[in-house]
Image (cartoon, rainbow, N blue to C red):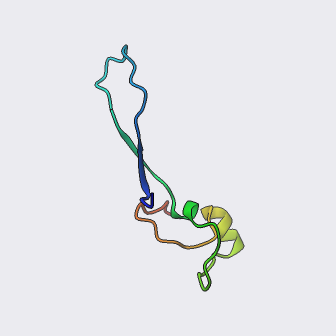
Amino acid sequence: MNSFVRSYHPYISPNDPCPPVKKKYYATPPQLFIGFQPRGLPQFPLHKALMRGTLWPIFSPEGGREE
């Protein structure tokens, strides 16, 4: 499972008047899959790392929030 996009099947209520969405998708950040820092990988400064929620500036196909 190395894809950053995952899916799940939500509960579909029999009383819901709207048409059901049978499969939903969500994105996972790449830092969830790195348990250690590879040699030579640059790090954010402490303040910026706390703001971004990750230590490493890793590429994510989803993009991020604008600062």
For this orientation, the residue located farthest to the left is 19
Left or right of 40? Residue 66 is: left
Q: Nearer the viewer, residue 67 or 37?
A: 37
Quadrant position of the N terminus in the picture: bottom left
Give how far across and how far down residue 22 sits, in percent.
33, 33
At 43% from the left and 27% from the top, the residue drawn is 11
Give how far across and how far down residue 41 sits, in percent.
59, 81
For this orientation, the residue located farthest to the front is 1
Give how far across and how far down residue 28 sits, in percent.
49, 55
In the figure, 37 relative to 63: above or below?
below
For this orientation, the residue located farthest to the bottom is 40
At 64% from the left and 70% from the top, the residue drawn is 55
Give how far across and how far down residue 36 sits, in percent.
65, 71
Q: Nearer the viewer, residue 41 or 54?
A: 41
- Which quarter of the picture shows residue 47? bottom right
In the figure, 24 relative to 34: above or below?
above
For this orientation, the residue located farthest to the top is 15
At 43% from the left and 63% from the top, the residue drawn is 63
Left or right of 61? Residue 67 is: right
In the figure, 33 relative to 10: above or below?
below
- Which quarter of the picture shows residue 35? bottom right
Q: How many marks?
A: 0
At 32% from the left and 27% from the top, the residue drawn is 20
